[in-house]
């Protein structure tokens, strides 16, 4: 009775958002933030957790969460559980990162979450609605010593550039294309400011549309912004493209960092063919005019490849449109493939496959390194083989881990690695199943 009294005191006092039905089932939510104030663009991690005194028979779907004045990025669900007074409670945590883009304070809104969980002593899921608490986040202004137009909050920034054309062989009338790409860690592409290009005397500048991309894994996000500038050199002589400085602010160190692209000097040579080019241009214009006159005199319809000019124009436009769509689809497909590939190369699945591949050779050091790199990727409460086997593995796997770590501690080889047991335990982890003393539970019902 004393244990039951403690539970009710906990549920009613410590957990103000709990819901208790007539059969004693307890459901409640908890919303936490890793900080209550942030700079413009600084991510705030928001965790929304729902608990039940039984289990969940259906996964949680919070849908799109809109935060006024901020970008919201959903990361992943995390299953959790704890034991109190002999009672096991299951929980599902949804993790979001919120990026303020306005200088006004923001509010992560109150949510009404529909869950399915069986009553105590029953197995069939029953629908419930759990309401969460709204969370206010204060947005701090950009420090006065920093430029608002260049402000970027990030964990790191890489800057690369490439050129189309030979910078050592430039003459008047030539065009060079410059592509600058920036990739920032811990932010979204919408918060990377556009490049402020400096005007250059005797050089025409023609920018292209920017390309932006977000790259998200289960635990991190980065963003990239790529911009093109075409330089048309209009006069001979030396042209200096000034250095370009890109800055970002690390809020955890309260420090501004920068990346610099050095100035570029280009010697523009005279173009002796400019007069010829002008003559050819005039000649082509005159030829086109003569063809129009000839059409009117002969009163015969001009035909191009067997088609009238109107039909040829229409067919050409359709062909160009089809080609443009195809190129865009091809670029999108390649971009998505690259994004998917990049995400895979930092995923739990990739590191598990690396571990499986390493287990085929005899290098115990390689096997151990790949094993623990995979365990790190899962973000377990304790990144150890023993913890993983105890939480998700069979008794056979637990014994295997014990023999394996004992052999490695003594510097001996371990040749009895059974991948089947590891594959089975990993599947239970992916399904959200957690091993307890009485068997297996599936908190998210997958």
Image: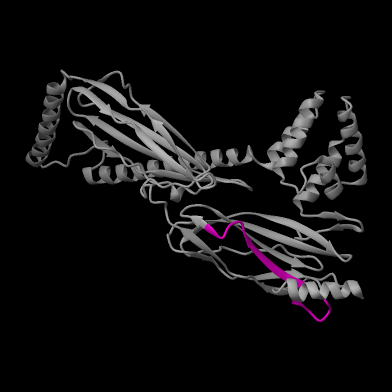
Towards the viewer: 173 or 327: 173
| Colouring of the image | one colour
Percent x, y of residue 173: 21, 27
Q: Residue at x 17, y 19 (%)?
A: 270
Relative horizontal placement of residue 140, taking residue 239 as reference (left or right): right
Towards the viewer: 295 or 197: 197
Q: How many numbered circles does the render carry? A: 0
**Up-down: is 34 above or below 235?**
below
Towards the viewer: 225 or 247: 247
Residue 225 seen in the current view: no
Span colored in magenta: 19-37
Residue 220 seen in the current view: yes
Q: Quadrant of the C terminus?
A: bottom right
Q: Residue at x 27, y 36 (%)?
A: 305
Q: Residue at x 58, y 38 (%)?
A: 342
Percent x, y of residue 425: 82, 46
Q: Quadrant of the N terminus?
A: bottom right
Relative horizontal placement of residue 328, taking residue 52 as reference (left or right): left
């Amino acid at each position: 009775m004393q244990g039951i009294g403690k539970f009710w005191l906990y549920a009613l006092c410590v957990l103000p958002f709990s819901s208790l039905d007539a059969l004693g089932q307890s459901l409640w939510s908890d919303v936490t933030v890793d900080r209550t104030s942030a700079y413009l663009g600084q991510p705030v991690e928001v965790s929304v957790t729902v608990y039940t005194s039984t289990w969940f028979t259906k996964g949680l779907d919070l849908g799109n969460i809109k935060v006024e004045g901020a970008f919201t990025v959903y990361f992943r669900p995390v299953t959790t559980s704890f034991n109190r007074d002999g009672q096991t409670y299951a929980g599902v945590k949804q993790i979001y990162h919120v990026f303020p883009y306005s200088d006004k304070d923001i509010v992560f809104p109150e949510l009404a979450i529909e869950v399915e969980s069986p009553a105590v002593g029953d197995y069939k899921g029953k629908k419930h609605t759990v309401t969460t608490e709204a969370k206010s986040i204060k947005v701090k202004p950009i420090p006065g010593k920093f430029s608002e137009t260049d402000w970027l909050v990030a964990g790191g920034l890489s800057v690369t550039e490439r050129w189309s054309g030979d910078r050592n062989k430039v003459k008047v009338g030539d065009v060079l294309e410059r592509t600058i790409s920036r990739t920032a860690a811990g932010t979204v592409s919408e918060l990377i400011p556009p490049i402020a290009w400096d005007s250059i005397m005797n050089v025409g500048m023609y920018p292209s549309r920017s390309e932006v991309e977000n790259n998200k894994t289960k635990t991190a996000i980065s963003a990239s912004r790529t911009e093109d500038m075409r330089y048309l050199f209009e006069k001979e002589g030396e042209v200096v493209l000034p250095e370009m400085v890109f800055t970002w602010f690390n809020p955890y160190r309260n420090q501004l960092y920068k990346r610099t692209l050095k100035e570029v000097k280009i010697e523009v040579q005279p173009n002796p063919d400019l007069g010829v080019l002008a003559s050819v241009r005039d000649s082509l214009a005159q030829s086109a005019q003569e063809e129009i006159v000839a059409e009117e005199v002969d009163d015969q319809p001009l035909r191009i490849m067997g088609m009238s000019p109107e039909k040829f124009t229409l067919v050409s436009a359709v062909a160009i449109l089809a080609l443009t769509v195809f190129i865009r689809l091809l670029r999108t497909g390649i971009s998505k493939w690259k994004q998917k590939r990049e995400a895979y190369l930092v995923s739990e699945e990739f590191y598990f496959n690396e571990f499986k591949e390493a287990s085929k050779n005899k290098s115990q050091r390689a096997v151990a390194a790949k094993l623990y790199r995979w365990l790190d990727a899962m973000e377990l409460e304790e990144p150890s083989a023993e913890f993983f086997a105890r939480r998700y593995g069979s008794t056979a796997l637990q014994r295997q881990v014990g023999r394996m770590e004992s052999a490695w501690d003594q510097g001996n080889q371990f040749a009895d690695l059974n991948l089947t047991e590891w594959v089975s335990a990993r599947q239970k982890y992916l399904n959200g199943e957690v091993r307890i003393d009485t068997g297996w539970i599936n908190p998210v019902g997958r």
